[in-house]
Image (cartoon, rainbow, N blue to C red):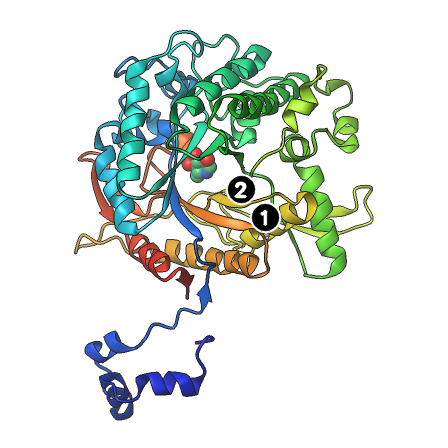
Amino acid sequence: MTNLTRRQFGKTLAGTAAAAALATGSFSRMALAQVPSAKSLHFPSGFLWGCATASYQIEGAANEDGREPSIWDTFSHTPGKTFQGDTGDVADDSYHLYKEDVKLLKNLGVTGYRFSVSWSRIFPKGTGKVNEKGLSYYDRVVDELLKNNIAPYITLFHWDLPGALPGGWQSRATSHAFAGYAAYVSRRFSDRVSHFFTTNEFVCFTDLGYKSGKFAPGLKLPDAQVNQIRHHAILGHGLAVQAIRATAKSGTQIGLAENANVYVPVIETREHIEAARRATREGNAAFLTAVLEGKYTDAYLQRAGANAPKVEAGDMKAIGSPLDFVGLNVYTPEYVRASASPVGYSVERRQASYPRMASDWIYIGPEVIYWAIRNVSDIWKPRALYITENGCSADDVVNADGRIEDTDRVMYLRNHLTHLHRAASEGYPIKGYFLWSLLDNYEWADGYSKRFGVHYVDFKTQKRTPKLSAEWYREVISQNAVE
Ligand code: NOJ
């Protein structure tokens, strides 16, 4: 109760059944319903509330209407690569059930929906002949969203690279192919879609795909090649920004969705805050720093030594193409302190008792969302920022009444939004928040074993059921505030 004084609160109650109930101590359910809800943390008006998903994780219809395999189709069908051999062949079948999914969005009251386009639905071979049937699926999705007053936010690349592109991101030609595809899609949709994200989470389709091999295409290459792949990825982003600017409707807003490492100062003192800032630049040197500065840091190049990427003339200019906004996918913090080390900071090791959610990599530290925004804003001063993903997996169960009481997810979200509010109230240019995810879906190598949705999906029947977190999020959106 921070926005009402006790006296005001008393006054509001005076004369109501609730006041009487309070006085007599018999606080019935009915009286409670009349107590004004004391949401204290209001977001700026016009703040965008949304949900996010991605094509391979929800669409299914893997072989329908001319779509050809992406590297994730091949990878997930390779024995031993994903949890119990799970694939995205059917996923949430959103290809057929998209109207139902838009209804879920509508019921939540969101004003934006971030989803991705499957490249190999549009260009089955990655380049060349376009597949009209693929395009018309996204026409239907976009039109359905608009009919329901939900703004579409399109991610152009969320890891499902067309399998037909020789060498994938190992080849520089893929960066150019991506720009061509991005230009085509944005030209086609920019009459109805005003925001485009080029790529989603560089590290997941470069390092995890080509270094650890945990994600598609499942390779384990040496550092020099990985650094080159990283370079092709950010080059692809930069060339796409240029190509979209040249072809899409003028005023189209372009950014990316990046899971930058987020450094939280161990204590909020000047020296540790400074350390977090230094760590943000160096800890993201291969990706976000290069994109926002148009260069690799000296320390990154020094660390890479002979393995540094080969950069051609014009590459860094393209990579540093000005953006309209930066999107941040935020899940988990790294704690950092000032130190006498050459880089001026050190990252703290997490204790075994540090709390996590159902995925072992989601350590809970809600202040991460504030520091993500603050570090990036203080260093690079982007025009606008979005949280393009935030959410968590939880061990959801359907109880005897058919409800999913995901109080742990609500705890996670509530606390993150509290810290998001701090960033907004301090004047950082944060424009919106996309919750990951609208519904349980294909969690990549973890298959269907990890649930991130605010809607529970029965993968046998495709039945969607709102969880407690969906009810809670709807309330946040309707109040434009978090309690
Ligand atoms: C980030 C990715 O963009 C998304 O595809 C994934 O499902 C979530 N994080 C959760 O891991």
View extreme (bottom): residue: 24
Vertical relation: 136 (above or below) 466: above
Q: Residue at x 43, y 17 (%)?
A: 71
Q: Nearer the viewer, residue 276 or 207?
A: 276
Residue 283 placement (x, y as % from top left)? 67, 38
Give residue 469's position: percent from left, percent from top. 33, 54
Residue at the far front: name it. Answer: 250
Placement of the C terminus among the 4 image quadrants: bottom left
Q: CA distance from mark 1 to mark 2?
A: 8 Å
- Asked if one can make out residue 312 in the rendered structure from this viewpoint, the answer is yes
Say what amino acid the circle numbered 2 marks: Leu
Residue 57 percent across, percent down from the top left: 35, 31
Task: State the residue position of label 1.
Answer: 372
Looking at numbered disc 1 in the image, what kind of residue is underneath it? Ala
Quarter of the rendering containing residue 80: top left
Place of residue 75 in the rendered image (x, y in percent of width and height, measured from the top left)? 41, 19
User: Label 1 crowding class (10 Å Cα cut-off): few <14, some 14-19, many 20+?
Assistant: many
Q: Which residue is mark 2?
A: 328
Element type where label 1 sits in the image: helix
Estimate how packed mark 2 is, as few (under 14), some (14 to 19) or many (20 or more) residues with alpha carbons within 10 Å: many
Q: Secondary structure at mark 2?
A: strand
In-front residue for pair 267/284:
284
Q: Which residue is found at the position 46% from the left and 48% from the top?
A: 432
Of 130 and 446, the residue lying toward us: 130
